[in-house]
Amino acid sequence: MERKKILLIDRDERRRNRILNFLSALNYEVKESNSFEEISPPPSPPRTPDFVLLSLPHLNENIIGLLKRLKNYWPKICLILLGDFEKADAALSLLKKGIIDHIAPAEHLLAIYSALRSESQKRKLSEKNYSFLQALQKLHLKQKEESKRASSLEEIYSNTLENLMAALDLRDVETFGHSKTVAKYSQVLAEIMGEKDRTSLENVRKGALLHDVGKIAIPDSILKKTSPLTRGEWEKIKLHPVLGFGLIKEINSIKEVGNIILYHHERYDGNGYPHRLKEKSIPQEARIFALADALDAITSYRPYRKERNFEEARKEIQKNSGTQFDPTVVEAFLSVEPEDWKKIKYETTKIIPGIEEFLGEGGQKKRVKE
């Protein structure tokens, strides 16, 4: 596999060398510079980088102009800003306009690697979705002549939606893998509650994977907002179950999938949304998913709070039995030990092991034993 090319621009020589050593050890091809002069005139293929890592202490009009020219030179490259900006609005504006693709702390090596990995995955998914959409267009034309192609068309739609859901997860590095994790939790809970049919369990998995597909229609400026949402923004967020159901109802008639997408924010006590359903009027698969979703949320890191362990999650879920959660689903959840839920999470997400052990004090690489 061809090594990804990175252009690293940072005036701080110590930090530049530290980042270079770290990324080189991860098999990236890194070219370094200490100034913007590196990009004028731009290199031609095959020397064009896949990524530009640019460390900036602040943003002003001159720097923003340089960033725009950089995107004009290389419209297909991924531009990642390294720094902590006092004026978040300026950086957010650049993100929304597509001038930059990501922001990561300049001193945080794992955050830089996460940004690179996330953007690589998004590009792969984008290419795959493009291939799916091309195949879909061809099938649309053939469907007019051959009705038997309808089942193939539905399968391609399903695959496209699953890839779109993975792409949605990748809009935020902090929540990457969430859909895959809650899908596994939901399947486990459904089995504990007596579901043995493999098709039904697979439908629960698909519904859990696609539960937030409606967020595709919600702007990044709302989804990624770090300050409190306005009432209007919160009302837009609350539309995503209905929007998601609308996306799949014409191409996927599987009941369990639609029920999870539409009802996954309903509460057992009737205080959820969008329809304020109560108790058994909420489909069982949606009641199962609600607990699975909460379990992953409680035990996962978020920028606004630290993750809690599975013992604390157990207490929190038990406390909300009969209000937020169906007591029968809570009983099924409590029948599995916290350590086993933890094992399911890490076996599902397949997080790269040992990366922190690979780094010594201050982020320096340790010698690896042969």
Image: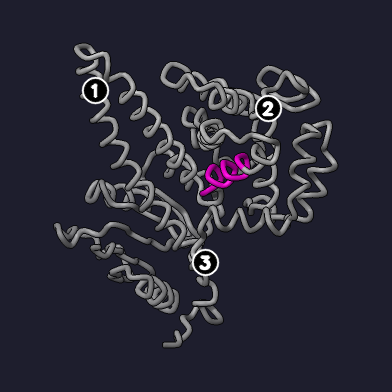
Label 1: which secondary element: helix
Magenta highlight on residue 285: no
Disc 3 and disc 2: Cα gap in Å?
43 Å
Callout in the foreground (3, 2): 2
On the image, numbered disc 2 is attached to which residue?
284
User: Where is residue 31, by image quadrant?
Assistant: bottom left
* Residue mark closest to the camera, 1 vs 3: 1
Q: Nearer the viewer, mark 2 or mark 1?
A: 2
The C terminus lies in which quarter of the figure?
bottom left
Corner quadrant of residue 63: bottom left
**Relative vertical location of residue 293 with respect to residue 345 in this rendering, above or below:** above
Q: Amino acid at mark 1?
A: Leu
Do the residues bearing badges 2 and 1 touch, measured as CB atoms within 8 Å? no
Q: CA distance from mark 2 to mark 1?
A: 35 Å
- Return the residue found at the far front: 196
Q: Determine whether label 3 and label 2 are within 8 Å by CB.
A: no
Q: Which residues are magenta?
A: 176-187
Q: Position of residue 83 (x, y in %)?
A: 49, 60
Neighbours of disc 1 within 10 Å: few (<14), some (14-19), many (20+): some
* Relative side of 58 to 42, left or right: right
- Residue under circle 3? 108
Residue at image point 55% right, 51% down: 174
Nearest to the observer: residue 272 or residue 182 = 182
* Residue tagged 1: 139
